[in-house]
Amino acid sequence: MARPTDPVSEIAVAAAAKGKGLTIEEVTKTETDSGVEARSVSSKIRTVEDLLRHIGADMERFEVAQSEGTTWEGLTADKDTGKPIIAQLHRVYVKLRPKKGPGVAEAVAAMIEGAKKDLRRPASKRPVIRRKTGPLQLINVADVHIGKYAWHEGTGHGDYSIEIAVQRLNDATERLIEAGARHRPSEIIVAYLGDLFHCDNPSLMTTGGTPLAGSTDGRLQKMIEEGSNALLSVTHRAADVAKTKTIVVDGNHDTTLTFAYQRIMAERFRKDKRVECLVAYTSRQYSSFGRNLLGFAHGHKAKRKLPQLMALERPREWASCPYREWHTGHLHNQSAEWSRPIETIDGVLVRIAPSLSTPDDYHAVNGWVGQREAMESFIYSPDGGLEAMYVAGPAIGGIQ
């Protein structure tokens, strides 16, 4: 049975028969608006990488969309004698397309790298307040939804925007810090419980892809800039009172930006001995204080399993801390499943934090209105248990 021949091999045979010293080295390159295509038939260019180097492909601008390579034995002519010789030949094809622009994660990472000089500010000149005794103050920052937009004429409820969110957060923080300072806490935890930002990408969608263009302020850069500054100010203010620990869990609206904010915060307080930033990427996190074990989650996953998960994930603290609580957000105190903002499940107290935000069109149409617009803080005794609780918000004249 005759062996199939390749057109290039036939050319080589003919050249060899005529005594021509032919070397098979053929490369073509075509550039279009959609990318670059290159082909080669060669004894030297053997791989896609060889071909990319040969054509000088700019791999900062392009990425490989398609490639193919084959190898076979063919006849060519010896350049000195002209006699036919067997040579190994390679056919390589590659198609390049322009690289896509960076996503939110890459853009924010670049922002962090570029801003480190500003974020790594000199350590505060304020003295580190270290009290060996005293209670714990917990400040929950939950569901602020910075970047959310609501118009009272369309919802029947209050307006909401980046400016309003920042103002509400600043005001509530100041009230809660002042109230907690009267207890002379030995430690403060600032727990960021997710949905800090309303959307998670330039297309104004949640992490899961739910479109929010109709209820979003629309300025992603301003949302990140002013939102991060306002959120950081909560920790700055707490650190003026006592040693402060920060905990961050992601929400269902802003998983990418929440973790990006965590990195921004870690850079900001890197040299500040008053602040310990817990950098972790799990959706459930924990902290113990005296005989208290506290769990933190956004609340949109594993809702009724939280007590069992606490026992499984923190068995040592579970055994030594008889006072156990979960702090969650997500539901804004309104839920058919959890009809109360406080519930005891399997002996563990589960709290649902309120939101400072007003209902947007989606919530108003579905009747999810009437929740308290507020922020909460808790005072825990090292011997275990809640000593005091404070609530601050725009509809509250003072502190409760």
Image (cartoon, rainbow, N blue to C red):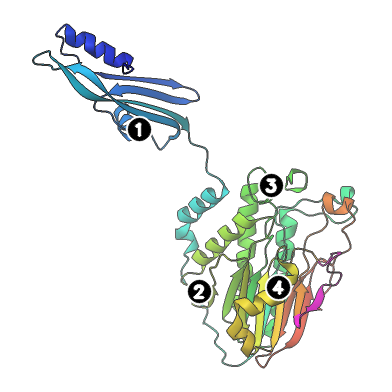
Instruction: Please rate how many residues cluster around mark 4, counting C-alpha atoms within 10 Å: few if below 14, some from 14 to 19, many from 20.
Output: many
Instruction: Please rate how many residues cluster around mark 1, counting C-alpha atoms within 10 Å: few if below 14, some from 14 to 19, many from 20.
Output: many
221 vs 364, left or right, is left
Task: Indicate which disc, 3 or 2, sits on the residue closer to the N terminus.
Answer: 2
Rounded to the nearest angstrom, the CA distance separating label 2 from label 4 is 38 Å
Q: Is residue 277 magenta?
A: no
Residue at numbered disc 1: 48
| Prevalent SS, magenta region | loop
Amino acid type for the residue under numbered disc 2: Ser
Task: Indicate which disc, 2 or 4, sits on the residue closer to the N terminus.
Answer: 2
Rounded to the nearest angstrom, the CA distance separating label 4 from label 1 is 51 Å
**Magenta span covers which residues?**
333-348
At 70% across and 87% down in the image, what residue appears? 323
Q: Nearer the viewer, residue 249 or 177?
A: 249
Q: Is residue 100 visible?
A: yes
Residue at numbered disc 4: 306
